[in-house]
Image (tube, grey):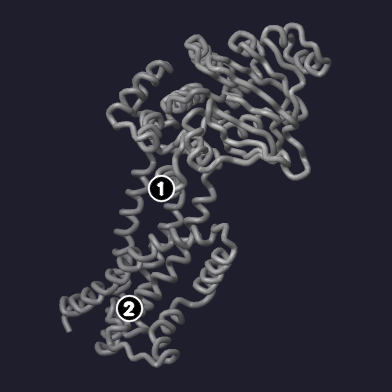
Amino acid sequence: MKLENARKSFGDTSVLKDISLTVNRGDVLAIIGPSGGGKSTLLRCCTLLETLDGGSLSYGDLDVCVNDTQGNAVYGPPSVVRQAKQRFGLVFQSFNLFPHYTVLKNVADAPISVAKVPKAQAEERARALLAKMGLAGKESMVPCELSGGQQQRVAIARALAMNPDVLFFDEPTSALDPELTQDVLRVIRELAAESMTMVIVTHEMSFARDVADHLVFMDGGTIVEEGPAAQVIESPQHERTRAFLRNYGN
Amino acid sequence: MDFSTMMGILLSGLGFTVQIFLITLAGSLPLGVLVALGRMSKCKPVALLVRFYISIMRGTPLMLQLMFFMFGPYYIFGLSLGNDWKYWACSIGFILNYAAYFGEIYRSGIQSIPRGQYEAAEVLGYTKFQTFTKIVLPQVVKRILPAMSNEVITLVKDTSLAFVLGIMELFSQAKALAASQVSMVPYILAGVIYWVFNFIVEIVLTRIEKRMNYYHD
């Protein structure tokens, strides 16, 4: 995934100012920074939940949007956008599982209804993914019967079921208590070990350091500092990054 | 007149009452979806038009609306539509009136579905149509069921307004019987029949509510 010179404003508030990011296959990128710094908006723009005002975005050979001569973002035709959506998945802070579907249907329905995978095949794969998430035996439950950590793992399985090239996480553990957080982080670590390409917005610094190759610190709609995860967290160069990380006891 | 004869006449009226009830539901439940979508439409003229329609339907008496559809074709267009027109006027009046109420209930349900549901569906690649029919609508049904129950029970009683069109439904029969027999009994029996009808409606609706209780948000 490649994002260049991304700009986004809500009204008069400029939320993203000239952001450029490249995520290569197998990379794990962590994005940290204070609330309101533009992290979530960045993710929402990458996952096409928001449109960029300016800049370009591409997934592999697919140009989702490009800059015109005035520097305004011009989005590709619906077919390109639809194709691009097949290339990423998103895990939300608040899970956003479909409450009226069973766990199995939450995971298997998009492959069946959207990707037109045969039902038996989609369900078999869904079961395998759920087992991998440590959720074997919970297939016929509904989300409200699961703990937050289990729900988030269902959400990860749901995203993985569409075989995304890159998986985005928007503060996946912020709605969870510390114990449940560990279950979710373990799953993400396992995915990293399998070279899953991931972009993770997180407040878990030690996790970011362990799991991410690359780390971006965002504040005020700009990338203040970026580099290898361990380096940015252990010896930040910018005063703003240092001040932020001090709150996390680093 | 013996009791069974009286009951027979009242139950023949109940036949029309049930017909009006079922036709109204069959027409207004789906039409209400269009009303709700029209009311929320981004196209301003459509939204405005639907708002006006809802306002008229809720703001004027159903009895008056029935008279309008009954006699409007003749007084406005000079059309004589025959003796069966009253059944059409009745169906049109009830369906249009209840669709307005149902539409508003649907809208409240649709707007109560969290944004996150739409976003999750969008990222997974569901089309707008799939998102609405597979993700949103089933959740809306659960949320609006209590409000819908109120309206459906009101509808059972509102069918008596067909009286003004000369349709011999339950209430009309009761009134005719009371007059000819100089007796209060037909009204009491009609009251009992309406109540039993609604009691059954309540049981059915409670059962549907229970069936949807397999999850909560």
Q: Residue at x 61, y 31 (%)?
A: A57
Disc with the residue nearer the chain's start (2 vs 1)? 2
* Along the viewing direction, whichever of A108 and B153 lies nearer the viewer: A108
Picture layout, residue B75 above or below residue B3:
below
Percent across and percent down for residue A21 are 66, 23
Q: Residue at x 74, y 45 (%)?
A: A11
Q: Work out which quarter of the rendered image holds the N terminus of chain A and state it.
A: top right
Tag 2 secondary structure: helix
Q: Chain of mark 2?
A: B
Percent across and percent down for residue A64 are 57, 35
Crowding at mark 2 (Cα within 10 Å: few <14, some 14-19, many 20+): few
Percent across and percent down for residue B123 are 51, 35
* Along the viewing direction, whichever of A22 and A138 lies nearer the viewer: A22
Q: Amino acid at mark 1?
A: Thr
The label number, if any, that marks residue B161 in the structure image: none
Q: Work out which quarter of the rendered image holds the C terminus of chain A and state it.
A: top right
Q: Residue at x 56, y 42 (%)?
A: B115
Q: Amino acid at mark 2?
A: Trp
Tag 1 secondary structure: helix
Instruction: Report the Cα–Cα distance between label 2 and label 1.
Output: 31 Å
Quadrant of the rendered image containing residue A129: top left
Disc 2 or disc 1, which is closer to the eye? Answer: 1
Q: Residue under circle 2?
A: B88
Report if residue A175 is visible in the image: no
In the current view of this chain or complex, which residue is farthest to the front?
Answer: A69
Report if residue B112 is visible in the image: yes
Percent across and percent down for residue B171 are 32, 78
Quadrant of the rendered image containing residue A134: top left
Picture layout, residue A1 above or below residue A232:
below
* Along the viewing direction, whichever of B180 and A216 lies nearer the viewer: A216
Q: Residue under circle 1?
A: B133
